[in-house]
Image (spheres, helix red, strand yellow):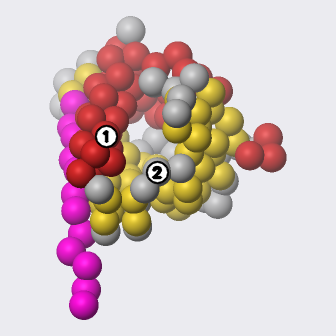
Amino acid sequence: MIARMRTIEAAVATTAPPAAVWALLADASKWQQWGAWSKVEIEGGGEQGPGAVRALVRAPFHLRERVTTWEPGSRVGYELLEGMRVRGYKAEVTLEPTAQGGTVVRWRSTYERAGPVTALLLRIAIRDACRRVAKAAAA
């Protein structure tokens, strides 16, 4: 039996150009400034890019994510390795330039299975992160 994938999508427009949004996404050390995380780091002290593993902390959660796609200035993808009760979680953030010089930030996540509380937390977190990064880039 093939599991039906669940999808969470958020899109927020910002007056900030794609380069400003990308600067926030690319620098994990700044995620605490715009995101809800109390600590974010790249394991091994390296830089973000394909294969890099990010450790994110916000009590009671301690997540590990692997970067799967890295297209500077336009797109980053990742998969959850551990830290939440969800199976097959993957996400992609894309930055689309607008005619006015701003950006539409799109955050799209898919997963195979999660309990109802975890699914709700994921929906809230994705929408919140999308809004926060767009707002911070415009500041």
Q: Position of residue 104 (x, y in %)?
A: 24, 35
Residue pointed to by mark 2: 84
- Element at badge 2? loop
Range covered by the magenta-colored residues: 1-12
**Residue 59, located in which quarter of the rendered image?**
top right
Residue 3 lies in the magenta-colored region: yes
- 36 horizontally vs 96: left or right: right
Closer to the camera in the image, 75 or 57: 57
Residue placed at 52% from the left, 16% from the top? 33
* Looking at the image, residue 121 lies above or below residue 67: above
Q: CA distance from mark 1 to mark 2?
A: 10 Å
Q: Is residue 102 visible?
A: no
Residue pointed to by mark 1: 121
- Mark number displayed over residue 61: none
User: For the residue carrying disc 2, how many other residues have a C-alpha within 10 Å: few (<14), some (14-19), or many (20+)?
Assistant: some
Residue placed at 24% from the left, 90% from the top? 1
The C terminus sits in image quarter: top left
Q: Position of residue 79 (x, y in %)?
A: 48, 59
Residue 106 lies in the magenta-colored region: no
* Looking at the image, residue 129 lies above or below residue 67: above
Residue placed at 53% from the left, 50% from the top? 83
